[in-house]
Amino acid sequence: MDSDNWHWRSRGATARSGPGLLYEPGNWGDLLKAAWTARVVAAVRDAAGGRELVLLDPFAGRASWPLSASARERMARVRDVEILPLVEADVTAGRLPSSGALALRAARRGGDALIRVFDVEPEFTATWRAEPAATVLDLADGRDALRALEAGAADFVLVDPYDLFDDWRELLDLSVPLGAGRAVLLYLYNKSPRGDGHAQYYGAFRRALREALASIGGAADAIIGRVPSDARLPRAYHEVVLLGPPSLVDRLRDALRRATIDLALTIGEPGLFEEGAR
């Protein structure tokens, strides 16, 4: 089977073949994840003292994706000096590394690293088998990797299922305690602007996050970044949550704030001022 036989459901599309996605790889959320992942993994690498890093991506998707025309246009606008060296060769070749693959590259800048991956689509996980540093986990569900994770078994965990916004309760309960011993990065597509019901549900997520952090007595802290889904009247926000030991979170706070604001300005600038009604 063609390893690129996948689709994302664009507006008006009717044809379907291969495993389906409800989003376009290389969207602004992927770039926000990339900005945070590159910086978080670099900080974890610096603290590791040269030892081998272990990464976990239990909702991994493909190791890389074909780069669409619109994703290429987004990449051309990005000036993030942490992201670009990690993706430049792939973008030139018309591809985009997944968040897990980008994390692995960041981890290898200064030492050895390996990554453990899982996805419910066998065709997606098959693309990881060509990476010697990747182990495809034999699981039924990515949550099982989080349930089995023991202290010290991973240095960086990426929690990016589809769709965390609609199904966050169990994953939040699993993820927050893990942040006491490692960096854990969560992604959700925040639909709060779509109405009161979505906003209230997001409010419940934030309350649950505060309560979960309080329940582990300050062993982990959290910071949150978000960018609009598009330049004009966004109906959602891409959002990432970093969980980790307070010392790691404190170290990353300013760098992640700057990276998030820079990306938000890159996204929003075309919608801030327009000439006429074009």
Image: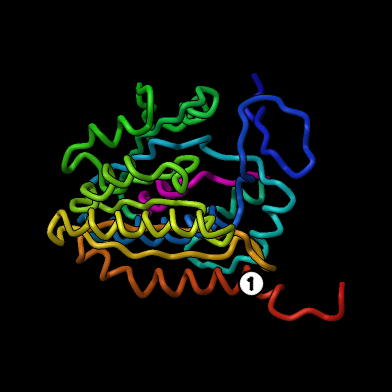
Q: Is residue 50 visible?
A: no
Indicate whether 13 appears above or below 51.
above
Q: Residue at x 35, y 21 (%)?
A: 138
Q: Residue 197 in the image: x percent, y percent?
A: 50, 54
The secondary structure type at the circle numbered 1 is helix
Q: What type is the residue that disc 1 sits on?
A: Gly
The residue lying toward the viewer, choosing from 52 and 145, is 145
| Left or right, residue 50 beside residue 99 | left
Q: Which residue is mark 1?
A: 268
- Furthest residue to the left? 217
Q: Quadrant of residue 46?
A: bottom left
Q: Residue 213 in the image: x percent, y percent?
A: 22, 57
Q: Residue at x 67, y 62 (%)?
A: 76
Residue segment shown in magenta: 94-109
Q: Residue 159 in the image: x percent, y percent?
A: 38, 45
Q: Quadrant of the N terminus?
A: top right
